[in-house]
Amino acid sequence: MGFKVYCSFGNGYRLTGDTRYKDIMIESAYTLVTRYRSHLGVIRSWDHSQDKWQYPVIIDNMMNLELLFWAFNESKDSIFYDVAVNHARTTIKNHFREDYSTYHVVDYDTITGKVVHKHTHQGYSHESAWSRGQAWGLYGYTLCYRETGLPEFLEQATRIADYIFSNPMLPEDLIPYWDYNAPGIPDEPRDVSAATVTASALYELSLYDKENIRQHLSRAERILENLTAHYRAKVGKERGFLLLNSTGSKPGDLEIDVPLVYADYYFLEALLRKQKLEQTGKLFD
């Protein structure tokens, strides 16, 4: 719901003020919280593959929380804030390893609430670090700190950033392979989408992690420069996509080394954030 509604109707409402968009977003937020179970403390992700998982929660779900925080600010209904914070805290507890790499899928027992499995669906293996998952985590906890001011979320975001940029398998141009543990590195496909999400998150993180502001900005700049110089599609080609070389799901043999819409979305967002920071020193009005 976050990707489908917040990224589309959310921008529509932000740019036009059309209250019809607002109404759809509030309704969508209420729809999203129907997928939350209080005794588990997380929002369910997929309904498919019930032979594999009881109650799967993916790290991507951190991106849904922006819709909930927005709905809380607009409606003042505390259910949105409570669900978002609880989901983020439970995800810290169960998704992340000691080194702050993340599992992709955590499966919960629907009755006891206990973790049943820790898996991957789009990464290399259950114990590997899927690069876009790291990016979702970085972005998600950065926005959670923006909306709550809770230090635990800022700490989580900075730790995830540390993992990404200290990883020996991160290429020199900062555009990651699709998984940090993929066995064929350096001959594995890159995932440009992971890089664009990371760059956008770093611009925001630089506002909060003052001790490392230059480092965050430098890395974001380097990612954008390298994407523009080496991963950009030619004008009029690739059906209008902006960037090449993303990887949707290599294990699923889907969208390997191709343009992806969310890579372009977060590339544009990162460019707009860069511009606004340079012009105003802030990202949000």
Image (cartoon, rainbow, N blue to C red):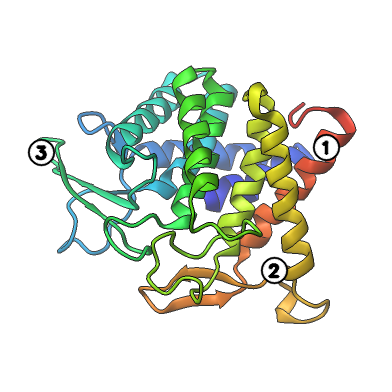
Q: Is residue 38 left or right of residue 234?
A: left
Judging by the rendered image, the residue that carries numbered circle 3 is 111
Q: Which of the two labelled residues, at mark 2 and mark 1, occupies the earlier sequence position? A: 2
Residue 76 is situated, as x and y percent measured from the top left of the image, at 52, 18
- Give the residue at the far left of this rendering: 112
At label 1, the amino acid type is: Lys
Judging by the rendered image, the residue that carries numbered circle 2 is 243
Q: Which of the two labelled residues, at mark 3 and mark 2, occupies the earlier sequence position? A: 3
> Viewer-proximal residue, 35 or 42?
42
Gap between marks 2 and 1, in whole Å? Answer: 22 Å
Q: Quick check: marks 3 and 1 in contact, CB under 8 Å?
A: no
Q: Is residue 57 left or right of residue 271?
A: left
Q: Number of labelled discs?
A: 3
At label 3, the amino acid type is: Ile
Residue at 54% over, 51% down:
3
Q: Quadrant of the C terminus?
A: top right
Q: Which of the two labelled residues, at mark 3 and mark 1, occupies the earlier sequence position? A: 3
Judging by the rendered image, the residue that carries numbered circle 1 is 276
> Viewer-proximal residue, 65 or 177?
177
Gap between marks 3 and 2, in whole Å? Answer: 44 Å
Label 2: which secondary element: loop
